[in-house]
Amino acid sequence: MIAWLKILLPMAALVLLSTTFLLSRDPDPSANLPISGSADPDGVVREQVTDPYFAGTTSSGGSLTMTARSARPLPDSDEVEADTLDAVMVMTDGTKIELKAPLANLSDRRGDAHMTGGVTVSSTTGYTLSTDSLTAALDRIEIESLGPVEGDGPAGHLTAGKMRVTSGETGDDVQLLFTGGVKLVYDPQTE
């Protein structure tokens, strides 16, 4: 009997010890990702990420951060659709450009974001502009409105058929170009 106890006790201790380790393991780490399913009007459940965050650098050394309320992959596409997108580009000299849009489609293949639904563009240089839609590169300073733009700048209120933001030839300067019937109502008090 004592011989059996000598064999059974270490085996029972080994079983208890192994179940302690098995039960104390963390749950699947992917289960903690903020992914949820939501049904579209057709009743199809689609995956989405809530409060996504992206950070990267541009080819000129500036930084780019993007946040959104939610993002989801578009079927049969490399694109991701994001709701309430907020993108901030910080140049190497500290100048910032912020883009806000209710909806954006981001494409890794094209390397750009197509923002729609009324986009607001603001900068630390004193511009606050709005347009219906625009396209912004994800790896360099390049933004182009797809239609008219209107807003306020350091010299006053302006409207234009199109707007383009690009880096200069050296890559250090950022240029804001307005085309297509530019109208500026000069206000000396804004300077």
Image (cartoon, helix red, strand yellow):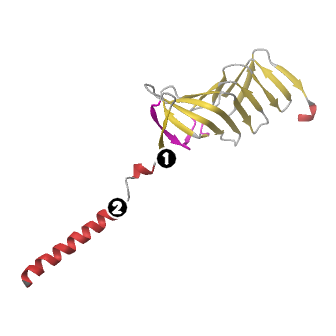
**Which label was assigned to residue 97?**
none
Q: Residue at x 71, y 32 (%)?
A: 120
Residue 60, magenta (yes or no): yes
Give the structural element (helix, strand or loop) at label 1.
loop
How packed mark 1 is, by other alpha carbons closer than 10 Å (few <14, some 14-19, many 20 or more), is few
- Along the horizontal axis of the image, is 136 left or right of 41? right
Q: Residue at x 49, y 47 (%)?
A: 34
Q: CA distance from mark 2 to mark 1?
A: 20 Å
Residue 76 sits in which quadrant?
top left
Residue 189 sits in which quadrant?
top right
Q: Quadrant of the C terminus?
A: top right
Residue annotated with mark 1: 34
- Residue 113 seen in the current view: yes
Q: Residue furthest bottom?
A: 2
Q: Does label 2 or label 1 sit earlier along the sequence?
A: 2
Q: Position of residue 104 (x, y in %)?
A: 59, 30
Residue annotated with mark 2: 25
Q: Residue 156, relative to residue 124: is it above or below? A: above
Q: Position of residue 12 (x, y in %)?
A: 19, 73
What residue span does the magenta drawing correspond to? 43-62
Q: Quadrant of the N terminus?
A: bottom left
Q: Residue 87, relative to residue 31: is it above or below? A: above
How packed mark 2 is, by other alpha carbons closer than 10 Å (few <14, some 14-19, many 20 or more), is few
The three-letter amino acid code for the residue at tag 1 is Pro
Residue 3, magenta (yes or no): no
Q: Residue at x 85, y 22 (%)?
A: 184
- Along the horizontal axis of the image, is 38 left or right of 118? left
Q: Position of residue 179 (x, y in %)?
A: 74, 17
Between 47 and 78, the residue placed more toward the observer is: 47
Q: Residue at x 67, y 35 (%)?
A: 100
